[in-house]
Amino acid sequence: MTITWQEAERSFGSYLRIEKSLSPNSVEAYLNDMGKLRSYIESEKNGKDPGSVTYNDLSDFLAKYPGGSDSARTQARMISGIRAFYKFLLIEGTVTDNPTTLLESPKLGLRLPEVLTIEEIDRLIGAIDLSKPEGHRNRAMIETMYSCGLRVSELVNMKLTDIHRDDGFVTVTGKGNKQRLVPVGRTALREIDSYFEKRKLLPVITDQNVLFLNRRGKRLSRVMVFTIIKGLATAAGISKNISPHTFRHSFATHLVQGGADLRAVQEMLGHESITTTELYTHIDRSFLRDTLIMFHPRS
């Protein structure tokens, strides 16, 4: 059975969205990588269809694919996407041979994410100008991200009905629409209350149940959250390359440093595998090593 690249990519996209429940951003990333592969095959391999692609074709593509300064990690992601694509085509019966079987991913060293200290978080929050209309919203947003270890998509999609004030928990809808309950601190709840009083003053609110809104009364975009945080980092004099995810990393790292149970941290972060959460034990060891170097008299 012969299938065109366009048909294969369209079916693969539907599979990722419906059966694998991936986010739109993840689906777009997969399809973007497949588009690069298709363009290469069409221009360099006489326009072979997906079922005719060989291991050598894929090796040639990966050898020419520019990975930039982070080439090993980029290529590992690309290989992962190609494997998922051909696994899907095998399941569908579209191809009979898997050309990715012998592909080897590059070895990746452990890359620890950027983490803010508690003092840096305080400085960043202190840089928020509460005299501006968005000030209380931005403070509530940062406190909520740090208090609950949220992904940016989880933050912008949070609803008023997700906040269980009396129980001290919030309902978080994570990847694959999976829900989890996460404790929320008193400071975050207090800032949400302050923001909510300002929120009532918006001239128009498109969705009454969405918590964090822009000045037009609509849900905040992911890009806007990135922009806000970059601006606050500059205002606070923080030179680290931070993003909304930095607060999630900081949340987990500070819990592990404080002695929190790793399984509890896994549950709060919504990680499927404990292996993902174990990254923060490496960060903690790095913190301990730096502490030793700075303060031990024999270091």
Image (cartoon, rainbow, N blue to C red):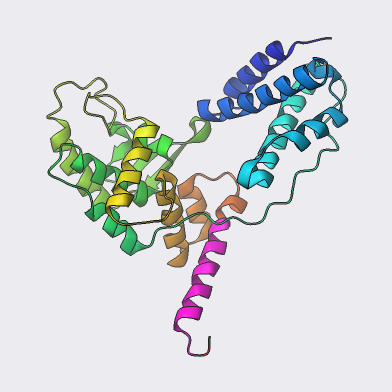
Q: Read off the magenta span.
A: 279-297
Residue 281 placement, left or right of 63:
left
Principal secondary structure, stretch drawn in magenta: helix
Residue occupying the point 77% across, 25% down: 86
Q: Is residue 276 visible?
A: yes
Residue 103: image quadrant is top right
Question: Where, by quadrant of the figure, is residue 10 drawn?
Answer: top right
Q: Does the magenta-highlighted stretch encompass residue 280?
A: yes
Q: Residue at x 84, y 22 (%)?
A: 53
Where's residue 90, x and y in %? Answer: 80, 22
173 or 244, which lies in front?
244
- Which residue is at the far bottom? 298
Q: Residue at x 15, y 36 (%)?
A: 133
- Image spot of residue 217 (x, y percent): 23, 24
Is residue 82 toward the left or the right of residue 280 in the image? right
The x, y position of residue 87, in whole percent, is: 76, 27
Task: Tell me if residue 259 can be seen.
Answer: no
> Does residue 143 lie above or below 8 as drawn?
below
- Viewer-proximal residue among 128 and 172: 128
Quarter of the figure with residue 26: top right
Q: In the image, is residue 65 above or below residue 129?
A: above
Task: Report x, y in % for residue 31.
Answer: 62, 24
Which residue does the image show at 44% across and 46% down from the upper left?
Answer: 245
The N terminus: image quadrant: top right
Let me know if residue 31 is in the magenta part. Answer: no
